Amino acid sequence: MDSAFRRMVAEARQQGDLYFAGLLPEDRILEAFGKARWLWRGWVYTPAVTIWVFLSQCLSGDHSCREAVAGLIAWRLAQGLKACSAETGAYCTARDEVPEEACVQLMRETGRKVDEESPPEWRWHGHRVLDVDGSTLTMPDTPANQAEYPQMSSQKRGCGFPIARFVVVFSLAVGTVLEAALGKYQGKQTGENSLFRTLHPALQEGDVVLADRYFSGWFDLALIRQREGHVVIRKHQLRATDFRTGERLGTDDHLVCWKKPARPKWMSKETYAELPDSLTLREVRVRVTQQGFRTRELIVVTTLLDPEKYSAEEIAKLYRRRWQAELNLRSLKVVLQMDHLRCLTPHRVRNEFYMHLTAYNLIRHVMAVAAAKAGREPWTVSFKATLQTVHRLLPLLASRISTDTWCTALLKAIADHTVGDRPDRVEPRVKKRRPKPYRKMTKPRQEYKNRAA
């Protein structure tokens, strides 16, 4: 991974590309654009430059178009080129013309490439483990966004923000996003499990889906098994468990048979008929003895039925690593500020969403390279520290520093910032800092202004 990364940076510098080309080469961008690149109109903002500037905007703390364009001006001056206009109109127009398919393709490619190149020892028993979880994000309150992603029905018109639900499939080995889906927050077939079903075509034979109990429905498990995948999922609390029944494999470990329920309305008759009449599943009871955990006992359901190859202890440890999805979502929503997007139309919102995931994957790529070189696992390296290091060192690629010197300094600095090892720490869910004593908005802002006048 180290040599390939250095070679990619060196090639980007030889071609004199914008320094973000060191993380995402131009040929991969043009490939994602496909035929759309031949229809592109732009002198300064070519497809590659537009994507590079877009990525810099997603990775910056300011997130403004002005800062992104200012960064492009600084690079052009460092290359001895004429400064482009500081007005953001041309950049916004170019960004609006980026096809959604290109953004999705870039997200998929950057995530899968890192996962495929990862060392075998980072995988769990040779399996690719997919850590699945979902969350929500908001966007500016414009008529177009409200029409596509309505605000919560409990809020008065003009008092809330358009909200969208998304599901992300992370690689447990390297933390990159392999697949993602974005949809409405409310309505039929808008839940996290419904969104995840749209991503099932990405499943490969032998994949292990690691998820919480929201994804533990019979049909969700059956559809994954239909694609030769496996699951390690927490059992839903409404399903009864009796370890005195079934085939006993060990203490708190047995095989059970789940019968096929009646066909749900969202499933076609053809798909329903293709599914088996029952599923043989393994249930493992996990007892939590550490202090600070609210849950004291849980049942994990899996299709990995061999107790010799996959012991109950290993199943329990794997499910505990599901928490990495929560940490990855925190990196996306808090560190990269993806909790509230800034675009005013649904098309731009979706592009902004997928470009945030692409930027996240690029940071994860550098983390994986640094971890492999230092003999560590990538999940022990700090995401925020990596982002800060990359943000500071990337502009140096426009200077005369040698590629080897730059890569060595970058990878060493990243590997030095490891995540603190604080097993089973206890932290109360309370806030010390008091919020400002403002009342919550209960009517449109214009009504407040009219009343004040």
Image (cartoon, rainbow, N blue to C red):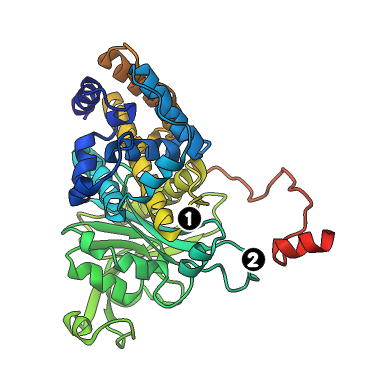
Q: How many marks?
A: 2
The residue positioned 28% from the left and 12% from the top of the image is: 402
Q: Secondary structure at mark 2?
A: loop
| Of callouts 2 and 1, the N-terminal one | 2
- Viewer can see residue 437: yes
Residue 131, position in %: x, y?
34, 54
Residue 181, position in %: x, y?
35, 60
The numbered dot on residue 288 is: 1
Q: Quadrant of the N terminus?
A: top left
The numbered dot on residue 234 is: none
Q: Which residue is mark 2?
A: 158
Residue 425, position in %: x, y?
55, 42
Taking depth in this image into account, of 451 and 214 the one nearest to the observer is 451
Q: Secondary structure at mark 1?
A: loop
The residue positioned 22% from the left and 56% from the top of the image is: 207
Asked whether disc 2 touches disc 1, contact meaning CB atoms under 8 Å apart, the reply is: no
- The vertical placement of 393 against 292, above or below, is above
Which of the 4 image quarters holds residue 133? bottom left
Identity, as a three-letter code, of the amino acid under mark 1? Val
| Left or right of residue 267: residue 433 | right
Residue 435, position in %: x, y?
73, 48
Which of the 4 image quarters holds residue 226? bottom left
Identity, as a three-letter code, of the amino acid under mark 2? Gly
The residue positioned 44% from the left and 31% from the top of the image is: 85
